[in-house]
Image (tube, rainbow, N blue to C red):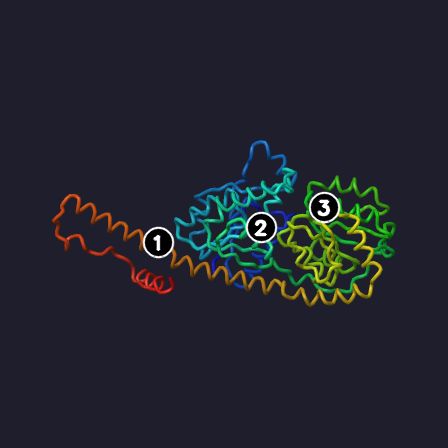
Amino acid sequence: MKIALIADVFGKENNGTTITAKRLVENMRLRGHDVKVIASSGGDVQLKRRSIFGFNWYLKLNQVELAKPDKKIIKEAIADCDVVHFLLPFLTSRKSIKLIREMEKPYTTAFHCQPENFSSHLFLHRVPFFNRFLYRRFNRLFYKRTQFIHCPSKFIADQLVKNGYTADKRVISNGVIPTFEKRNVSKPEELKDKICILFTGRYVPEKRHDLLIKAVKISKYADKIQIIFAGGGPKLNKIKKLGRSLKNPPITKLFTKDELCDTINYCDLYVHPSDVEIEAIAAIEAFTCGLVPVISDSPNSATGQFALCEKNLFRHGDPAHLAERIDYWIEHEQEKKELGEKYITYAAQYSIKNCMDQMEKMFLDSIEHYTYYYAERRLMKAAAKKEETWKAAWATEPLFDKEKFAAPVAITEFEETASEEIAVNS
């Protein structure tokens, strides 16, 4: 297949959407597909950077670059593509979806931007009515125009149903690459006597790094615990400031894939305190390597679905309960080791191969659906045009020669076949 990926945000791997998109591109290419990325940075087809008056400083702070739509460039880029995949419901994607329908190209979408991720920047992620407004706005402006939505978790698919999304929602994990596996890795010399707790996530408010710092501060083992925050983001300085209250201030670093896998394998526990998650591939990467997770039970997060027992969950927003869970796993090493082995088996379903198989199927289903959809649409337009011809003739010449105006509108042999199949399957 020739696949085009239109990305409003691409480039630096400092957010889950970009990391997921790059893995999708890489793995589809490994399967022999011709994939081109249309984006403002890091893509195969370059768009200009979009400027938003008054907010450019904030985009720069978050290291985010938005693409500016260009009809001519996009039209040329997708002219020979079999299917187009959209990552986000922002301006470039919204403008492009209209163009693609005019060009009669099959397409799919993905739901990677949870409204709470957006509203957290406005400090409104805990305001339900505002988040419902965003769900409905995304649907009205973008998703209602598509037949297929890739949902990284059942949680987000259920949220879309609650908010009136009627498209075919394909629940497909973003998948874990083979790099993440169980390894025998020794702790660095400076961490030999420490209990290492890892959390991988962007440094933004909704990830709740502050919660883990507060929990460790009141843990029975506070003097021995070393937090490792893998990631990057605008709240780095705030996290460092909070971390100074600990005996062992958190290590903050943006790791490479191999470095992160080694870090996972020498750590003692993984904690995911985030209030908002569509899936949290970072948590899956951790338990794929056998690292036992402790996860927030936030109602706005999908990550709680990965809990294999009660002790894998803590009450969201409650540092005391998180500290209790951390202490439990420190004191029950054998139970933790056994559960870690169960997690390795459990994680097999999230392998990148399984996920790419399902993405491939969604693309093929889209091509089949839109082939008949566009053919039916052409037939309907032709029928409407024929009816208008009859009406015009009747208005000017009520007793017209029927043979003169009854000639059928020309349609291709394929459209005749398509219309028959549509009729059979409807």
The residues bearing labels 1 and 3 have C-alpha atoms spaced at a distance of 49 Å
Q: How crowded is the residue under tag 3: few (<14 C-alpha within 10 Å), some, or many (20+)?
A: many
In this picture, is 1 found above or below 399? below
**In the image, which disc is placed on residue 377?**
1
Report helix, strand or loop for mark 3. loop
Identify the residue shown where x is 51% and y is 42%. 91
In this picture, is 337 found above or below 410? below
Are the two marked residues, 1 and 3, in contact with CB atoms closer than 8 angstroms? no
In this picture, is 361 found above or below 317? below
Q: How crowded is the residue under tag 1: few (<14 C-alpha within 10 Å), some, or many (20+)?
A: some
The residues bearing labels 2 and 1 have C-alpha atoms spaced at a distance of 30 Å
State which quarter of the image contains the C terminus: bottom left
Which is nearer the eye, 254 or 90?
Answer: 90
x and y, in percent, of residue 286 in the image? 71, 58
Q: Which residue is mark 3?
A: 208
Q: Which residue is mark 2?
A: 112
x and y, in percent, of residue 358 in the image? 54, 63
